[in-house]
Amino acid sequence: MAQAYDEDLDCEGLLCPLPVLRARKRLAGLAPGAVLRVTATDPMAAIDLPHFCAEAGHAFLGAERDGAVTRYLIRRS
């Protein structure tokens, strides 16, 4: 996933629901169309972040796993 992003949010070591709560807070401060990269180790983030995006109207752009870490890209609506 070589897509550019505007902000980076490190949620490594945090468990559900903290990655989603922190992503929501960070996205609220971004301009519409900005891309947030969330880095997380909690396997539930793979379910929670896309679900959050669908509920909030943000675009879930995808995920890339690298060992225990997964990086998610979200475009703010």
Image (tube, helix red, strand yellow):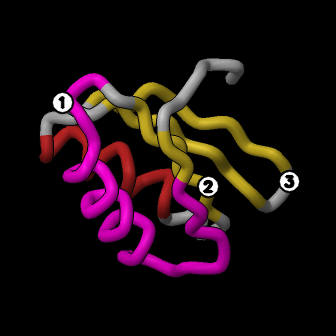
In the picture, the quarter occupied by the N terminus is top right
Figure check: 75 above or below 41:
above
Amino acid type indicated by mark 2: Thr
At 30% from the left and 70% from the top, the residue drawn is: 21
Q: Are marks 3 and 2 in contact (CB under 8 Å)?
A: no
At 74% from the left and 57% from the top, the residue drawn is: 69
Q: Which mark is residue 77?
A: 1
In the picture, the quarter occupied by the C terminus is top left
Q: Which mark is residue 67?
A: 3
Q: Secondary structure at mark 1?
A: loop
At 67% from the left and 50% from the top, the residue drawn is: 70
Amino acid type indicated by mark 1: Ser
Which class describes the residues within 10 Å of circle 1: few (<14), some (14-19), or many (20+)? some
Q: Which residues are magenta?
A: 9-33
Q: Is residue 53 magenta?
A: no
Tag 2 residue: 39
Q: Nearer the viewer, mark 3 or mark 2?
A: 2
Q: Secondary structure at mark 3?
A: loop
